[in-house]
Amino acid sequence: MILDRDNPPSGTVRDWLDMRADKGGTAISFPETGTSLLWADLRTEAHDFAAALTARGAEKGDSVAIVAPNSKEGVIAFYGAVYGGFRATMINLAAGRDAISYALDHSEARFAYVHESCSNTFEEANSGGVIPLSLGSGTEVSLFDVEPGDHALLMYTSGTTGKPKGVVHTNSSLLAGGWTSAIAHDLTSKDRGFCVLPIYHINGLCVTVMGSLVSGGSLAMVSKFSASRFWDQVEAGGATWFSVVPTIVSHLLHGSAEPTETCRSQLRFGRSASSALAVETQSAFEKRFGVPIIETMGLTETAAQILSNPLPPSVRKIGSPGIAFGCIVMIQNSEGEEVPHGVEGEIVVQGPNVLLEYLKNPEATSATFRDGWLRTGDLARMDEDGYVYVTGRLKELIIKGGENIAPREIDEALYSHPDVIEAAAFARPCDSYGERVEAAVRLREGSRVSADTLIKLCNGRLGSFKSPDAIHFMAELPKGPSGKIQRMKLADVLPV
């Protein structure tokens, strides 16, 4: 099987893992331990775990919970579950006991792989008697046949309201998720990605893990992000590219660690996703480190990427997550009609990377699709070249005096101050205007910037009507597992 830029990968994850194993080479290196995992060994160990599950009575399509950080064992368990024809259910370790317990119960998982570092977390959340299984098996058993349309992945959204929804991806859409990144970034067998984001999040799993599978490349994987060790780990792992989120970009920019010339020379690019990257942050990062950042956009429901800027020397438009790769993206109005270039509307998507359904939630599945298009809930406009400019979320709009205000406008203004590491504007109820604007920020250590200074900065860029009435200083803004700031929680956690 050869990667085709015009057509998504055919076959199953099992097919592709078998092919990579037969060709040989390194699948993943682990800079923290100095060890590596060959494709052939990954296939063998995945097969053994699949056999163990089958022998214990797991049925085809059953959920198998994976409770693990980024690790050799976690990757083997993921591939083993999918290889055996089961639904790998990635448990979000940052979600808290109640959310983990909900995922275990809702998924109806009977078996789980539990990493030794997660045993206490699992025991506290395992109210339904899910059985932990070890990796490895000497069992000789025939595995289930696997088809491209079979369930392969179950990943729960980290929504800010209501119960998390279980996003179901098939073998086909999971492979397509890796393919969209591979074709956007021209990934080849010579590339090695740096996997620093958790693989229980769609970005870490599809962009890096699936991206390396379908491109024939490899990975360097670490257990978690460290600003002080990031560049050393990139160099030690031999990475040629990395995928991060805006908060990581900001933390690296405001940190003291510098890449060596060797590190800079081996890196082709970094990519940013999960939420909007502030223009000032991107420009400052590239100027300081000499590494181009490719802004992208994706969703759990689309197996990660839907939009990406092309690689240099093609046109990158700073402030835009780019153009569609491997799928079709349109901007529609509330009636489902395409709007003209430059007009704001909702981003909708069609493509092979789109989810199959929300598990056991036909109402939510039906509500998220309109005439075959997946509704993202993101507001944006598209220019004549097909580049999309995200303006906000439908649910996050601040409506002040009947006027819609996109929080991102205010975020961008705050990020223009060099001391601001994190920023998020949000709405508060207001008797006069219905809602008023406030914002939370995290400053670099030792900064003495005042709220008045930041409000005046916003006044100068946005005018007083859109500027925050109050600035809240926080040691850390609330975030989801991918590092995305959870704007909707701010009004609840900050004093009035």
Image (spheres, rainbow, N blue to C red):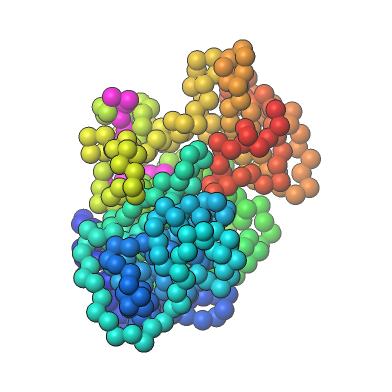
| Magenta highlight range | 321-335
Choose between 124 and 288: the one closer to the eye.
124
Decide if residue 474 is in sight here: yes
Choose between 131 and 443: the one closer to the eye.
131
Choose between 159 and 394: the one closer to the eye.
159
Picture residue at 58% right of the left edge, 14% below the top: 433
Is 35 on the left or on the right of 216, as rendered? right
Is 371 on the left or on the right of 82, as rendered? left
Picture residue at 41% right of the left edge, 46% below the top: 165
Picture residue at 36% right of the left edge, 28% below the top: 345
Indicate the position of residue 6 as horizontal and vertical percent values.
21, 55
Location of residue 364 (image quadrant): top left
Magenta segment: does it hold 495? Answer: no
Is 226 on the left or on the right of 160, as rendered? right
Number of callouts in the render?
0
Is 437 on the left or on the right of 19, as rendered? right
Instruction: Quadrant for the C terminus, please.
Output: top right
Instruction: Quadrant for the N terminus, please.
Output: bottom left
Indicate the position of residue 54 as horizontal and vertical percent values.
31, 74
